[in-house]
Amino acid sequence: MAREPRERKDRDREERDSEFVDRLVHINRVAKVVKGGRRFGFAALVVVGDQKGRVGFGHGKAREVPEAIRKATDAAKRALIRVPLREGRTLHHDVQGRHGAGKVVLRAAPAGTGIIAGGPMRAVFEALGMHDVVSKSLGSSNPYNLVRATFDALKREDSPRSVAARRGLKVSALQARRGDADGAGADA
């Protein structure tokens, strides 16, 4: 078995990495006081996604900002999740998520609405490739808690296909019920 040349492995890795977009959400500078003065360290929170339904977040710490960002990006790529999107642009249903004191509410939105969200949540939606969503953060405004709460909500998102499989129904039967529910709500 012949080994692959190192250049080809590096090129394959670069091609795989180029499909992802990364968003820097937050940088935190911390100082450690020592005998000669202060030593600074940096912590970075990064969100990475392929804009086709996969997204992840990572946290990295280092003495310099670029190194912290690199570590966070690597961690985010290792922790990707897949989120089912309706028509590739919005959520299938409204969902809530929480982490610590951070709570978020995500709502499906009609086409043309855009991303209505605050900074950390907006970064997640842009990396995910979502185009229409209405969201509200309640409680803590800490970016770490908001990103984790948003991921908690996205993990609870179900596609009609998975719900139909779980219930032993056909997707068309579920979609018909959705139409009935929308019609009943309009009359009331």
Image (spheres, helix red, strand yellow):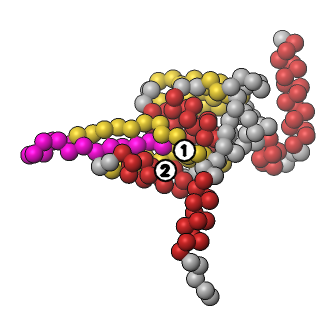
Is residue 98 something that shows in the picture? no
**Residue at which label 1 appears:** 22
Q: Main secondary structure of the magenta part?
A: strand
In this rendering, is residue 124 above or below 4? above
60 in magenta? no
Indicate the quadrant containing the N terminus: top left, top right, bottom left or bottom right: bottom right
**For the point 39% across and 48% down, which residue is it?**
66
**For the point 55% across and 67% down, which residue is it?**
10
On the picture, is 61 further left or further right than 123? left
**For the point 79% across and 37% down, which residue is it?**
87
Question: How many marks are shown on the rendered structure?
Answer: 2
At label 2, counting other C-alpha atoms closer than 10 Å, the crowd grade (few under 14, some 14-19, many 20 or more) is many
At label 1, counting other C-alpha atoms closer than 10 Å, the crowd grade (few under 14, some 14-19, many 20 or more) is many
Magenta highlight range? 32-46
**Residue at which label 2 appears:** 73
Query: Residue 33 appears at what percent x and percent y?
Result: 15, 41
